[in-house]
Image (cartoon, rainbow, N blue to C red):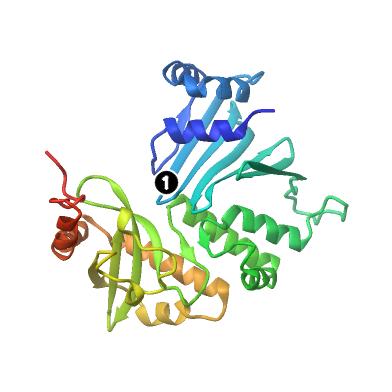
């Protein structure tokens, strides 16, 4: 069996993070293998006995989390698709694999040297309701699968948070599907949102004046018709134990205050604090999309200037004499 952990590691180590998808045809695969021997064995096994193979690859990274996606096709026919992710925690690195091929869904995880694996039949999509069978997924199995796939995107979804699991279990299949689509779209854009309504922050990627997208943690707050944000950057992002910007000690976690006008703040404020988990998460995703849409070059420059001024003393104490957001020449 193909070592998907090795394949995923190779993709993350050898492919750049990108907004779009990198496509390799048969000649492109062969050329890439010559330049990247680390992936040769895995790609050979992945494309073995495949006529006219092509591979689509995408990779995202944010903070302590990285994920790689791949699709294997023969001509226009999709043969196999999957994802590999790594998450760094105080207890070590957690690796996860999700693969769909030949009507089966394989999920694997590796943590502290232990590997777990589960294989189930992929539910068929049909216009007529499927007949009940022993392989039909129960609602509890669907919830468990959701946890495994989305726990790194909607932060707080883990087995220790039994109350969170219960809230998800109480959702209807339609609501769970909607939440899954929301989480998938968030993952593609590098967005992480907390489940708990007492946590105000959002994690995402924003382009800065140095030409790169930086991982940021945003604590939002509303004042009249404006959205005020305390933004923390890269290595200075505070831990999840801080719920709002008021909890963060600015001496140890320097950020910069940023604000701009935003549409419908009252509606957003209401939904962000909703007791309905789905509505609350939809509001957080909407807020992240609005921030991303309104963040242009002038906003980035304004933030960079503010960040450099507000964090100057902190950076100087660490021996850094220039903001990491300023390009070096």
Which of the 4 image quarters holds residue 104? top right
- In the rendered image of this protein, does residue 4 appear above or below residue 149? above
SS label for mark 1? strand
Seen from the viewer's position, the closer of residues 257 and 236 is 236
Tell me which corner region of the image, top left, top right, bottom left or bottom right, holds residue 42.
top right
At horizontal 16% and vertical 44% (from top left) the residue drawn is: 327
* Residue 179 placement (x, y as % from top left): 58, 63
Question: How many numbered dots are placed on residues in this image?
Answer: 1
Tell me which residue sits at (79%, 60%) in the image: 138
Residue 24 place in picture, x, y as percent = 48, 26
User: Is residue 265 left or right of 285 when viewed as pictured?
Assistant: left
- The percent position of residue 226, horizontal first and vertical second, equals 27, 77
Q: Position of residue 169 (x, y in %)?
A: 69, 69
Q: Is residue 84 left or right of residue 61?
A: right
Residue at figure coordinates x 17%, y 57% from the top left? 317
Query: In the picture, residue 298 is in which quadrant?
Result: bottom left
Mark 1: few/some/many CA within 10 Å (<14, 14-19, 20+): some
- The foreground one among 14 and 101 is 14
**Image side of residue 110 versus residue 140, left or right:** left
Measured along the vertical axis of the image, is residue 175 above or below residue 59? Answer: below
Taking the spot 13% from the left edge, 51% from the top edge, the residue there is 321
- Quadrant containing the N terminus in the rendered view: top right
User: In the picture, which quadrant includes the C terminus?
Assistant: top left
Vertical comparison of 122 with 251: above or below: above
- Looking at the image, which is closer to me, 132 or 75? 132
To which residue does mark 1 refer?
61
């Amino acid at each position: 069996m193909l070592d998907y952990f090795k394949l995923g590691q190779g993709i993350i180590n050898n492919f750049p993070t990108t907004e779009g998808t990198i496509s390799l045809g048969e000649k492109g695969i062969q050329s890439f293998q010559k330049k990247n021997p680390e992936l040769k064995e895995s790609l050979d096994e992945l494309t073995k006995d495949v006529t006219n193979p092509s591979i689509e690859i995408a990779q995202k990274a944010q903070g302590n989390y990285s994920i790689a996606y791949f699709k294997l096709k023969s001509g226009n026919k999709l043969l196999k698709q999957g994802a590999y992710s790594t998450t760094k925690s105080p207890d070590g690195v957690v690796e996860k694999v999700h693969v769909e091929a030949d009507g089966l869904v394989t999920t694997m995880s590796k943590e502290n040297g232990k590997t777990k694996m589960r294989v189930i039949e992929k539910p068929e999509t049909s216009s007529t309701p499927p007949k009940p069978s022993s392989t039909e997924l129960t609602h509890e199995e669907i919830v468990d699968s959701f946890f495994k796939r989305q726990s790194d995107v909607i932060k707080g979804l883990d087995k220790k948070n039994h109350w969170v699991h219960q809230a998800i279990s109480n959702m209807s299949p339609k609501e769970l599907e909607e939440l899954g689509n929301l989480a998938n779209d968030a993952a593609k854009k590098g967005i992480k949102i907390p489940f708990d309504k007492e946590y105000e922050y959002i994690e995402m990627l924003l382009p800065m004046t140095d030409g790169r997208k930086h991982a940021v943690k945003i604590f939002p707050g509303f004042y009249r018709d404006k959205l005020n944000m305390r933004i923390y950057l890269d290595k200075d992002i505070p831990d999840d134990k801080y719920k709002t910007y008021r909890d963060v000690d600015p001496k140890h976690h320097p950020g910069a205050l940023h604000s701009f006008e935003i549409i419908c703040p009252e509606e957003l404020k209401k939904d962000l604090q909703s007791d309905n988990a789905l509505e609350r998460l939809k509001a957080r995703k909407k807020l992240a999309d609005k921030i991303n849409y309104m963040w242009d070059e002038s906003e980035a420059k304004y933030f960079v200037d503010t960040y450099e001024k507000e964090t100057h003393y902190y950076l100087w104490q660490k021996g850094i004499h220039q903001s990491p957001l300023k390009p070096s020449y």
